[in-house]
Image: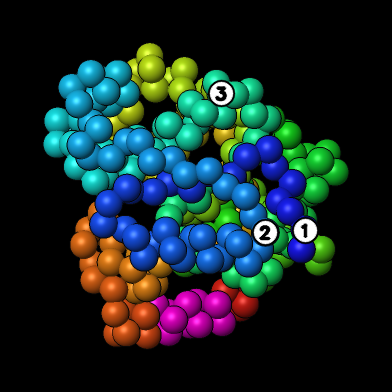
Amino acid sequence: MGKLNVEKVFVLHVKKGYEARLESIKKQFAAFGIDFELILDGDIPDLDKTTLEKYFKGGIKENANAVTSCTMKHLLAYEQVVNNGYKDCLIFEDDIILMPNCLEVINKTLEEIKTRPDINKKRAFISYENSRMKLVPASKRIPGQYLYKADSPRYAGAYYITGDIARSIMQHTLRYKCDYVSDWYLNIYQKEFNMDIYWCHPPVAEQGSHSGKFTSGLNRKKAGLLRRIAWNSQKIYKSILINFK
């Protein structure tokens, strides 16, 4: 089994109450031979006044909850990238489900960054998941190409980020403060963060809290068979539909 060609892999995890997610991560990543580091700080009890004042503003600060905690963990991952001088990393939320071809496809995207002259290597942000059911239309796909320029991320459950982008995000956050949940934050301020967003096709990950495998930690939607059937039905439908666009 090969390895992911990045300097660091982070998984964002809540310390208590999400043991099934951690077990899923350990099992999957061990099967793929992926080394990772957990981001455990930033749980709701960790969000004291000093922390909230340092990183946040607006409703996400005044009504600090699971959304604030999730976003805090993303910010802590970026701080680790900056403080350790990592050139790049992959970030996963702990409900992520990896597809069987994930290792091969992710490495293909990382190689593509290096070889395509139209991609700025320091500004590339890659979304790997299908959690918004946003797919690359068949009419835009190019044989052998994995990366496609996009206007927005596809949530924040599985993505690649460079050290330069992480530095820009933290500089902006410490100066102006974060006022949105992580995926909206990345989308709304992408120009300020100096990001060029790319979607990976085919996507190689999905969030179990969207697919019904896990109960959502943000909106408390329950895990269950009916949600999984509905998700898979929608996924099949949209996968077919996108082939006609």
Cα distance in 3D space between marks 2 and 1 = 7 Å
What crowding class fits label 2: few (fewer than 14 Cα within 10 Å), some (14-19), or many (20 or more)? some
Q: Which residues are magenta?
A: 231-240
- Kindly identify which numbered label has been placed on residue 82: 3
Secondary structure under tag 2 reads: loop
Lower sequence index among marks 3 and 2: 2
- Evaluate if marks 2 and 1 touch, with contact meaning CB atoms under 8 Å apart: yes
For disc 2, the marked residue is 33
Looking at the image, residue 107 lies above or below residue 207: above
* Magenta stretch: includes residue 239: yes
Residue 42 in sight from this viewpoint: yes
Secondary structure under tag 3 reads: helix
On the image, which quarter does residue 161 sit in?
Answer: top right
Secondary structure under tag 1 reads: loop
What crowding class fits label 3: few (fewer than 14 Cα within 10 Å), some (14-19), or many (20 or more)? many
Residue name at image x 43 percent, y 31 percent: 76
Q: Position of residue 148 (x, y in %)?
A: 67, 53
Q: Which one is nearer the viewer's eye here, 122 or 53?
A: 53
Horizontally, residue 108 falls left or right of residue 25, namely right
Residue name at image x 44 percent, y 52 percent: 93
Residue name at image x 19 percent, y 42 percent: 65
- Kindly identify which numbered label has been placed on residue 46: none
For disc 1, the marked residue is 2
Cα distance in 3D space between marks 3 and 2 = 25 Å
Q: Position of residue 43 (x, y in %)?
A: 28, 40
Residue 203 in sight from this viewpoint: no
Horizontally, residue 170 falls left or right of residue 61, namely right
User: At label 2, which amino acid type do we have?
Assistant: Gly
